[in-house]
Amino acid sequence: RRGKTWVLLLDVDEFIAFNTIEDDDPPSPLEEAPEGVATLKDWKVMHGRIRGRKRAQLFGLYEGEGTRNGTHIVTGAIRESDEKIVYGNVVRDDYGTRYFLHDDSTKYQDPKKVLSQAPEGIPTLKSIQVRGPKLYGVIYNDTYDNPKKMDGEYTHIQIHPKLKRELLKSGNIIQDSQGRKYFIENEQLLWPPHVNASQVLRARKELPAVSEGKTILDVIERYRHQFYFGSCLQIPRVLYGSKESNYQPMAPTGFNDKDFVTLRYRWHAQKGNFDVNKFQKTIIDVSRVPMDHLEGEQAYNIHRPLEYFCRADVPRFATSLFRVNHYLDSYEAYTYRNDARGNKRKGCMECYLKKGNGTDFAVNDNIRPWLRSFVDEVGEAKAHVLLAGVGDFRPLGEETLVDFMAEKGGKYVEV
């Protein structure tokens, strides 16, 4: 059923929560430029070396006072870090000029002036990024290389020095330095638009507390007609570190707060700080995704599993109804899991401490009432069965669930 078949893609150390408004929230994106600040539309980030230093510049359509109005420009080196170069923000270059970064995806280009798909025989490039004289991107339908590059393979081409930068807009055909043609896909048309910041702010004020027993699906159902979520709802993460603190015990009788990472750890990183929190996680509405995108296709990555349906940019924290709490946990827990990163985790205290840098920005207790609500919902006996082994990090396979329950003074029952 459309809009009813949502798949949540989280790791075992992550927990989704309602993104209620709090004092330490980052600012919401601006919807228009402040007075006296020029707007940069259809902008792209260009990374390179400026005066010997690795810096970012912006290329885009300038809208403001003076003779540059309506022309494409390249800014000076941007002073802000990459995490600040996102839509809705004002950035400053090293000449002191300020630019408001327009949310281009909410205002599509004129379809009469751009192509919706590549002409026959011309490869497609998407997710492009310019670095000096080279253009990097993901290629599809390669017709030039021998052997041909695989669909979805990351590649680069040499840009002709006289290539007009405005041609790098989505939906255009460009030529490389050898005269070979490529289509720049208008991928923004495939993404759900960003939601209006002021509307989300009102909705976030109405979000339920964890203790109220509401589910993620309840909230999606309530707001899916007000906000277009699309088929790929992306959620910002907040990393919780391993800093211990005094807290009011919240575990019901028979449970221990220290066994539950969501009750034990309260200190987290600054919200919206990409350097610490990293990439988003997603909920996919598979009822909106054609079967040919689900059958026999490997996920692009866990943060953006469906490249054609998930946005490439990181979601703004202030415009999300949900957030994902990502827990570093204790060193014992961090090194316990046997996954693709297991070899890097085992015995690497330095890795553990490095990952926890910056996770002592603020304290949050909003998710901690979940356990008491869960026990009230399913009953104490069933809760003990469902949560058997929590907080225990003995090697898997040493004992059965029945043995473990007997050791804890309980018994195994069918649920």
Image (tube, rainbow, N blue to C red):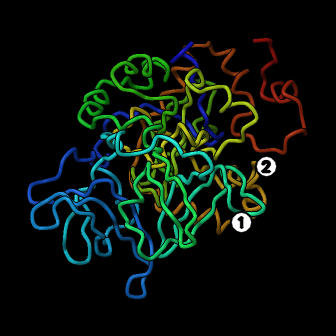
Which residue bears the numbered disc 1?
348
* Residue positioned 66% across, 39% down in the render: 12
Q: Is residue 14 visible?
A: yes
> Against 7, is 165 above or below?
below
Sequence-first tag of 1 and 2: 2
Q: Residue 10: image x %, image y %?
A: 61, 37
Residue beneath the point at 31% across and 49% down: 26
Q: Residue furthest bottom?
A: 52
Horizontally, residue 382 falls left or right of residue 241, namely right
Residue at the image position 41 percent from the left and 56 percent from the top: 273
**Numbered circle sitting on residue 338:** 2
Mark 2 residue crowding within 10 angstroms, few (<14) / some (14–19) / many (20+): few
Q: In the image, what residue occupies the spot 64% across and 47% down?
A: 301
Quadrant, the C terminus: top right
Q: Which mark is residue 72?
A: none
Q: Position of residue 222 (x, y in %)?
A: 39, 17
Location of residue 252 by image quarter? top right
Q: Marks 1 and 2: which is nearer the front?
A: 2
Nearest to the observer: residue 153 or residue 109: 109
CA–CA distance in space, label 1 to label 2? 14 Å
Indicate the amino acid at tag 1: Cys
Q: Position of residue 67 (x, y in %)?
A: 12, 67
Residue 213 is at least partly visible in this image = no
Q: Secondary structure at mark 2?
A: loop
Q: Is residue 181 above or below residue 53?
A: above
Instruction: Kindly check if marks 1 and 2 are in contact, taking CB atoms under 8 A apart as contact.
Output: no
Would residue 173 be found to the left or right of residue 333 on screen?
Answer: left
Crowd rating for badge 1 (residues with CA inside 10 Å; few <14, some 14–19, many 20+)? few
Say whether residue 26 is left or right of residue 119. Answer: left
Q: Give whichever of 339, 249 is nearer the camera.
A: 339
413 over 312 or under it: above or below: above
Callout 2 amino acid: Asn
